[in-house]
Each structure stands twice: as structure tokens, then as C-alpha cells.
Amino acid sequence: MMAMAHVVLVLVVLLVLNEIFRRSRSLTMAFFAITPVFLTAFVWIEAASAEDASTNTWFHWVKLYSVIAAVLGFTAMRYTRLGESAMMKFFPALILAVNIAEAVGRDVELGIATGGGWHYLNAIAGVLSIITLSGWSGIFIDKGDRKDLIWPDMTLFWIIAYDIWNFVYIWFCVPEHAVFGFAVLASCTIPSIFIKRGTWIQARAFTLAAWMMYVFTFTSFIDSESIAIALPDHPALLTLAGGISLAANAAFAAVHFGKMIKLRAFGFGREVHAQQMALDN
């Protein structure tokens, strides 16, 4: 009961934090630029170096700082002229691709170490998630009060396929955090559907960075059995999950490249899905 209550609390807090960071540049900078300096020096290194700490891997450290860098970069785009730079518009796609590639590398690493073929299925799904990124040239900063970073070409289909891949990745590689991972994914998918379309990448950076900071700050609590929700680890079930992840991302890839060929939208960063929607309307 306590474990499920904690998962729900994580979801609610991340949803609230996303809305706070959408509205306040000063709080965003204080939380993601100043706080990490002190936490790194006085909390994170010691907490992560504890025996059996789940965060004491290269992946977790790279993920922590890369997603904080994403938040700071997106904030600079939102509140300065960097948001108008054609070159800077590639930054969201680059940082997202790097983060997915980190996870793909970890899946492959564990696949080699354990012989689990399901890791390779999910790694291929992650690669498909990267190569179907498109339309970053159309990223813009909303002129409203929120100054949201909008990526029109990032469709709900891609987001759902990504969510499946990422959840399966956490299940395979950090199983003790898998249910939390579902809550973190929901915390950026929900606002991108029901609050502001096109803001998924911004919400993903806010919520994932906040979650990683929480994990590193309270590592022993997050790793404790009292709040752990175990998922089954039967090889057949893991293989099925890897197959579903691959199938979802392959399905999106088929749609994506089909539209790309139909529209002859082959340029680097060129919009595909937004262009198709414009034609349909």
C-alpha cells in the first residue's frame, strides 16, 4: 500500500513541478542550476557510492547531468534569442537522441553480460526511436506567457512508442524502479496530451531531471524494499516485452518513413508529420 501511494505521489508531484517550471524562469534556474552544485558536493557522491546503491553506475551519472543540461538548454531557448537559432533547434533532438542512445548502450551491455536476448530486442527499438526523430527545424517558442518550447512534428504515436520502449528498458535494466518509471513517463505524457500539445520534450526534461535528482538525493529510500514493487523476470515474459517494444517502434517507423517518402521530406530535420497534417487540413 505504501509503495503504491509513493508511486502516485511521485506522479502528482512531477505534474505539479512541470507546471511550476513552465511558469517560473527563476525557480527553474534555482532548482536545476544552483541546487545540483550543492547536492553533488554534499549528497549525491556519498549516496551513490554506498554499497549496493542502484545509482552507482555510469548510466545513472550520465543520465543525471545530461537531463539537467537539457533543462538548462531548453530554458535558455525559451527566454533568449537562442530559441530563434536554426542551429540551436537541433539541440532538443540531439540531447534526446543521446539519452536514448545511452539506454541502448546499457541494454546491449547487459545483454552481453547476461545473455538476455530481450535486451537486444529493446535496443533495436531504441535505435528506431532515434532514427524516427524529425522536424526539429520546426521547433518554436510559444509567444504566450508560458513561453513553451513546442515541437509540432513529435506525434503522440512516437511518444507512446517511446514510452513503451523506455518502460521496458527500466524493467530490464533497473527493475526496482520500473513502476516509478511508469509514473515518470506519465508525468510528461499527460500534460503533452491534456494541457499543451507539442510540449512533451520540455515536460520530459523537467520531470526526468527532477526524478533523477530525487533518486540521487534519497537513494537508500528509493532502493529500500519497503517501497519496491517487483515485476516478474521470467525470460519468456521479458522476451515478450522486448518484442512488444520493438513492434511498437517498428510500426511507427513504417508510418514515419511512409510519410517521408510520400512527401519527399528527406531534408535534415525537416518536418514530416506536421507537413502531412497541414496538407490534410
Image (spheres, rainbow, N blue to C red):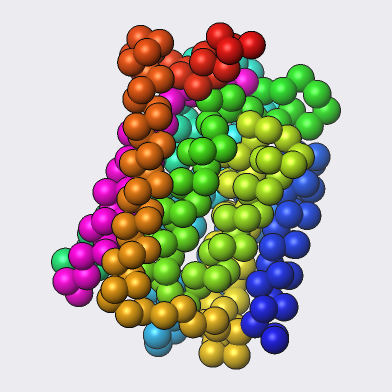
Q: Position of residue 253 (x, y in %)?
A: 36, 34
Residue 60 in view, yes or no: no
Kindly indicate the quadrant of the structure image that contains residue 114: bottom left
- Span colored in magenta: 114-140
Q: Position of residue 232 (x, y in %)?
A: 41, 80
Q: Does residue 6 show up magenta in the picture?
A: no
- The structure residue drawn at horizontal position 58% and vertical position 47%, both measured from the top left corner, is 204
Left-right relation of 208 to 145: left
The one of 182 and 281 positioned closer to us in this rendering: 281
Above or below residue 128? Residue 91 is above
Left-right relation of 149 to 242: right
- The quarter of the rendered structure image containing the C terminus is top right
Kindly indicate the quadrant of the structure image that contains residue 41: bottom right
Above or below residue 40? Residue 29 is above
Above or below residue 228? Residue 126 is above
- The structure residue drawn at horizontal position 68% and vertical position 48%, both measured from the top left corner, is 190
The one of 265 and 210 positioned closer to us in this rendering: 265
Residue 270 in view, yes or no: yes
- The structure residue drawn at horizontal position 28% and vertical position 76%, both measured from the top left corner, is 235
Q: Does residue 131 show up magenta in the picture?
A: yes
The one of 240 and 140 positioned closer to us in this rendering: 240
Above or below residue 120? Residue 234 is below
Left-right relation of 135 to 173: right
Magenta span dominant secondary structure: helix
Q: Position of residue 94 (x, y in %)?
A: 41, 34
Residue placed furthest toward the bottom: 226
